[in-house]
Image (cartoon, grey):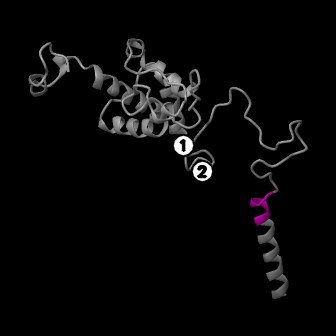
Amino acid sequence: MLILCALMVAGCERAKQDMYDQPRYGTFAASPLFADGAAARMPPAGVQARSRGDFAGSSSGRQGAGQVEDDLAAERAQANPYPVDMRLLEKGRERYTIYCMPCHSPAGDGDGLVVRRGFPAPPTFHQDRLRAAGDRHFYDVIKNGYGVMVPYGDRIEPHERWAIVAFIRALQLSQHAPAAALPEAVRARLPAGGQP
């Protein structure tokens, strides 16, 4: 009788495990169910994420809902919704270095290493048109791309896009700061005429 009970318990455990390890398609697997032959499906148009982040999948969406709300707020903003402080500028500099600097250069003048090797030059951030452009313009270009620039919306999170925008504004200010805005010690070193 004891052996029979042990076999039944072992059978139940196997049935329980089968519920967790159900048959499913692997990543990029083929499927005869769909016309394109791929098992992977794009979500229907207009689908909104309920939660996102490291624990969203393992918590059945209970964790990560706040990240979705933050992303939606960042997506709706027309100007940078975050306080521009050193933390935001450091994050923007880090992301700019990774994604933007190869083309736009460290100074934002459009003479990056990729351009020096023959890629079309992007416009300089220091031209009047881009200094006058709203923050949302830069956010949209980062997200959707522009001209030969690929979209980075799938690689750069909304809050990181705003951090890059803040850093671009800092680059612009670094080249076009009015003399009156400079500290007195720096103004004293300026040549006659008051421009660096």
Outermost residue, front direction?
117
Local packing at callout 1 (Cα closer than 10 Å; few below 14, some 14-19, many 20+) is some
CA distance for labels 2 and 1: 9 Å
In the image, is 142 to the left or to the right of 6? left
Q: Which residue is mark 1?
A: 64
Quadrant location of the N terminus?
Answer: bottom right
Q: Which residues are magenta?
A: 17-22
Image coordinates for residue 61, horizontal then vertical, percent: 61, 44
Q: Which one is earlier in the sequence, the residue at label 2 or at label 1?
A: 2
Assign the magenta stretch its main secondary structure.
Answer: helix
Image coordinates for residue 5, horizontal then vertical, percent: 81, 81
Image coordinates for residue 76, horizontal then vertical, percent: 50, 22
Residue 151: quarter of image:
top right
Q: Residue at x 43, y 28 (%)?
A: 111
Q: Which residue is mark 2?
A: 59
Residue 60 to residue 117: above or below: below
Residue 65 to residue 55: above or below: above
Given residues 58 and 3, the one toward you in this image is 58
What element does badge 2 sit on? loop
